[in-house]
Image (spheres, rainbow, N blue to C red):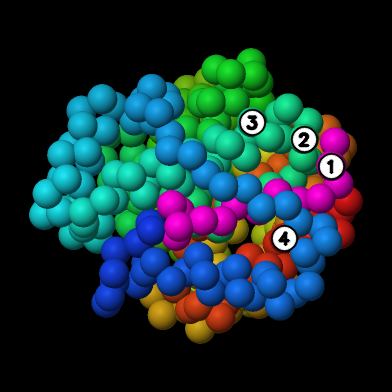
């Protein structure tokens, strides 16, 4: 198994975005890769290139009707995929499929013991539901990856850890009654930020009651607040003994993001990534994949995601 970290890049995933003046622009990919190059980690990184996801892979999570809707509207480039956040621009089906494909490629590489750790910057599209788009997210690569790990590799205990400022509602509600999807999410309190969910009392339903951890934090929460919340996340994940860890590394939780109200620094992302690597080594044979998620201040996302990759590298 290589001790290098696998990082995905390429025009296929860079194409995922919605143009100016939409905050999720296609420049986010190149901004990150430029910062990563400046970080001097080349000797410890291999670059992977995505493939498009197959329809049956998208259907592991999404309904056939929704997949068809995205395909049709992507061809015309007209209309919306949700109620007004996610426009149906031409080619968005192919770009969203490439995002999913990149994550599934990373899963395959890690599960086949070619790498322990991988990072996909344009991914972590955690708002998309099984039957609809939401919050700039067309296909939910995180949810698809969890289902893919189950189907292709017979894993059961997959952990999803989310530090994006927004609650990972698309993942949470899709698996709310599933006791084997281990879910932990630190996010800005939904009383102040989209999507308005992720309250502390939302801990799962039915057999899954008590298996989900939502930690809302107030606007202006800083690194000290993050560390207090993170201690709970780390203890929870450790106790659950996962077989694989998916980390959503949204950088919109950093101070200065134009659409959120939090005040972390990139140290939070570095700390979380290092801690999850330790847990992955303890429980998962080292297996962890990071996805970029949100982040609309370009400097913030470039620095935060690069710190995640550095933490993966330094974890060995």
Q: Nearer the viewer, residue 153 or 95?
A: 95
Q: Are marks 2 and 1 in contact (CB under 8 Å)?
A: yes
Q: Is residue 291 visible?
A: yes
Q: Quadrant of residue 42?
A: bottom right
Report how far apart the C-alphas of labels 2 and 1 lie in the structure. Answer: 6 Å
10 Å neighbourhood of mark 3: few (<14), some, or many (≥20)?
some
Report how far apart the C-alphas of labels 4 and 1 lie in the structure. Answer: 15 Å
Residue 134 in picture, x, y percent from top left: 30, 50
Q: Is residue 3 magenta?
A: yes
Of the two numbered discs 2 and 3 on the same chain, state the one appearing first in sequence: 3
Q: Which residue is mark 3?
A: 108
Dot in front, 2 or 4 = 2
Report how far apart the C-alphas of labels 3 and 1 lie in the structure. Answer: 14 Å
Of the two numbered discs 3 and 1 on the same chain, state the one appearing first in sequence: 1
Residue 225 in picture, x, y percent from top left: 67, 70
Number of the label disc, if any, that sits on residue 2: 1
Q: Are marks 3 and 1 in contact (CB under 8 Å)?
A: no
Q: Which residue is mark 2?
A: 114
SS for callout 4: helix
Report how far apart the C-alphas of labels 4 and 3 lie in the structure. Answer: 19 Å
Q: Which residue is mark 4?
A: 309
Q: Nearer the viewer, residue 283 or 26?
A: 26
Residue at image position (75%, 74%) is: 39
Report how far apart the C-alphas of labels 2 and 3 lie in the structure. Answer: 9 Å
Dot in front, 4 or 1 = 1
Residue at image position (48%, 39%) is: 51
Of the two numbered discs 4 and 1 on the same chain, state the one appearing first in sequence: 1
Q: Are marks 4 and 1 in contact (CB under 8 Å)?
A: no
Q: Is residue 298 above or below residue 77?
A: below
The magenta-colored residue range is: 1-14
SS for callout 2: loop
SS for callout 3: helix
């Amino acid at each position: 198994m290589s001790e290098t970290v696998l990082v995905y890049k390429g025009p296929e995933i860079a194409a995922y975005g919605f143009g100016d003046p939409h905050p999720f622009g296609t420049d986010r990919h190149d901004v990150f890769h430029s910062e990563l190059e400046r970080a001097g980690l080349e000797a410890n990184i291999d670059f992977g290139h995505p493939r498009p996801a197959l329809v049956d892979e998208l259907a592991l999570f999404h309904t056939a009707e929704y997949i068809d809707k995205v395909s049709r509207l992507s061809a015309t480039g007209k209309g919306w995929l949700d109620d007004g956040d996610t426009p149906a621009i031409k080619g968005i089906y192919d770009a969203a499929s490439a995002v999913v494909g990149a994550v599934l490629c990373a899963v395959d590489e890690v599960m086949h013991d070619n790498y322990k750790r991988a990072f996909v910057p344009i991914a972590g599209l955690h708002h998309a539901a099984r039957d609809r788009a939401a919050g700039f997210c067309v296909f939910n690569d995180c949810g698809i990856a969890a289902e893919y790990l189950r189907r292709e590799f017979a894993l059961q205990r997959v952990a999803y850890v989310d530090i994006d400022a927004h609650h990972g509602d698309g993942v949470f509600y899709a698996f709310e009654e599933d006791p084997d999807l281990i879910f932990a999410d630190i996010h800005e309190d939904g009383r102040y930020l989209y999507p308005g969910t992720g309250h502390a009392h939302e801990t799962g339903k039915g057999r899954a009651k008590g298996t989900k951890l939502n930690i809302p934090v107030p606007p202006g929460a800083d690194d000290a607040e993050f560390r207090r919340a993170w201690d709970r996340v780390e203890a929870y994940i450790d106790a659950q003994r996962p077989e694989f860890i998916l980390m959503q590394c949204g950088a919109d939780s950093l101070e200065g993001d134009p659409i959120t109200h939090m005040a972390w620094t990139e140290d939070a992302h570095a700390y979380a990534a290092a801690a999850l690597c330790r847990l992955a080594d303890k429980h998962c044979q080292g297996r962890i994949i990071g996805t970029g998620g949100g982040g609309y201040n370009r400097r913030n996302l470039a620095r935060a995601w690069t710190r995640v990759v550095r933490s993966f590298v330094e974890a060995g």
